[in-house]
């Protein structure tokens, strides 16, 4: 929904289980209609649509896509962004590192993303651009620190993304719909930080994509560079950049100076704790962190040490034995907790990072799209859980309350 000054706020429907199109459609009918009535009764309400590979294939079959578009129009709903990160199952099964499969070296990932672009260009309102979020190319631990393998993944991913830019450029020329891919850095992804994202963009993506567009389409170098920067952007997930201990203002400034766009901001909060000195208090924290150690998703832990270095663990179970480390002063864990909570017993959230980002967006619009992305409701400790519809509403209202952009 448009919340003022051109900002569109929604939530990501990866919160809802469902890998088939029938299951996705049912969840949208169940949750979107009452939510719109409560939070945006008189204005159109946007959807941050998540489609698995299976659901995207089924949506293009028979008359499903036109029927869905009619349903959106009849109910004052629209689709402007799609979550194209998880390719397969995302609920009710062990996801962990499989969320990165297939990675950007594969034709399956490219074909899936092109399909999402076709769907989005059909659904997208005429006056809006559309964004598709995607994985940070691959999963770093699979490469085991092998520089040769890493460079090969970067090279292959760049080639695939060059093909995607060509597709998106042609799509815009033929349909008038601007679609951009929003790459989402996250812990243990091949791209984790702004440094890694910018280095990939400048050293790998840009040279290969420009060469591809010049040779395949006869573009000038300037036009090819402009096409890449139009169609390949950053997805700024607040939780993920908080885990990397990066200051939002510095990241935004660096991207602006490089001419790299932010396609969307995903509003999310990580779990954190400032570590006390006493062993007894740390043992209490360990017990509380254990409640968030579950088997569905990866919950990487990034530890800030007293000398300023960062120690990283691939998941909570591997990190917990090290909570007593006297050099550690702060823990942050990749567990998307409700954004309206700033603490849970002795644990805290990185909600303050969201507030920093909102202040920056109030001062300067670097993207139009804000997407709440708390997808962990079904694996949260029982004390935090609420009815899902009410929880979604509360998160959106929290953003509106703390974001001063009303016209």
Image: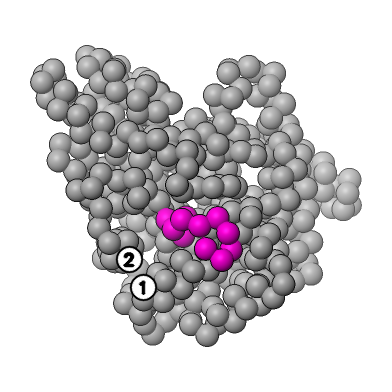
Residue with the mark numbered 1 = 35
Residue 125 image-quadrant placement: bottom right
Q: Residue at x 46, y 48 (%)?
A: 91
Q: Where residue 148 sits: x, y (%)?
A: 69, 18
Q: CA distance from mark 1 to mark 2?
A: 7 Å
Say whether residue 407 is visible: no
- Quadrant for the C terminus in the image: bottom left
Residue 121 image-quadrant placement: bottom right
Residue 130 vs residue 225, the one in the foreground: 130
Q: Does residue 16 show up magenta in the picture?
A: yes
**14 left or right, relative to 203:** left
**329 left or right, relative to 27:** left
Contact flag, marks 1 and 2 (Cβ < 8 Å): yes
Dot 2: element: helix
Please state the extent of the stretch shown in magenta in the rendering. Answer: 12-23
Q: Where residue 263 sits: x, y (%)?
A: 54, 55
Residue 389's tag is 2
Q: Where residue 362 sits: x, y (%)?
A: 36, 61
In the displayed structure, 398 sits above or below 108; it is below
Residue 36 vs residue 7, the one in the foreground: 36
Residue 319 image-quadrant placement: top left
Residue 302 vs residue 299, the one in the foreground: 299
Which of pointers 1 and 2 lies earlier in the amino acid sequence?
1
């Amino acid at each position: 929904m448009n919340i003022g000054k051109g900002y569109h706020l929604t939530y990501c429907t990866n919160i809802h289980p469902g890998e088939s199109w029938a299951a996705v459609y049912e969840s949208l009918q169940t949750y979107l209609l009452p939510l719109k009535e409560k939070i945006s009764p008189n204005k159109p309400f946007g959807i941050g649509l998540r489609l698995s590979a299976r659901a995207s294939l089924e949506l293009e079959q028979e008359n499903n896509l036109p029927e869905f578009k009619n349903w959106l129009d009849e109910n004052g709903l629209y689709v402007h962004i799609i979550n194209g990160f998880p390719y397969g199952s995302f609920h009710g099964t062990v996801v962990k590192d499989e969320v990165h499969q297939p990675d950007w070296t594969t034709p399956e990932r490219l074909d899936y993303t092109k399909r999402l672009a076709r769907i989005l260009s059909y659904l997208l309102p005429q006056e809006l651009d559309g964004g598709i979020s995607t994985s940070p190319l691959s999963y770093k631990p699979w490469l085991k620190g092998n520089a040769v393998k890493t460079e090969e993944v970067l090279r292959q991913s760049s080639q695939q993304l060059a093909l995607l830019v060509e597709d998106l450029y042609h799509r815009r020329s033929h349909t008038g719909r601007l679609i951009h891919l929003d790459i989402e850095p996250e812990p243990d992804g091949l791209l984790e930080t702004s440094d890694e994202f910018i280095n990939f963009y400048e050293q790998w993506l840009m040279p290969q994509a420009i060469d591809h567009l010049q040779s395949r389409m006869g573009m000038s170098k300037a036009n090819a560079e402009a096409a890449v920067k139009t169609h390949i952007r950053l997805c700024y997930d607040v939780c993920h950049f908080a885990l990397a201990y990066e200051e939002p203002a510095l990241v935004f400034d660096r991207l602006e100076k490089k001419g790299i766009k932010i396609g969307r901001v995903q509003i999310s909060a990580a779990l954190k704790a400032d570590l006390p000195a006493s062993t007894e208090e740390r043992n209490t924290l360990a017990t509380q962190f254990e409640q968030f150690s579950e088997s569905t998703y990866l919950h990487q832990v990034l530890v800030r040490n007293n000398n300023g270095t960062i120690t990283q663990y691939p998941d909570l179970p591997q990190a917990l034995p090290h909570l007593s480390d006297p050099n550690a002063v702060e823990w942050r864990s990749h567990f998307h907790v409700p954004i309206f909570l700033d603490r849970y017993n002795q644990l805290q959230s990185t909600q303050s990072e969201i507030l920093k980002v909102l202040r920056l967006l109030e001062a300067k619009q670097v993207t139009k799209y804000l997407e709440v992305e708390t997808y962990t409701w079904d694996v949260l400790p029982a004390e935090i859980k609420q009815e899902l519809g009410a929880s979604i509403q509360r998160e959106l209202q929290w953003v509106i309350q703390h974001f001063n952009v009303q016209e």
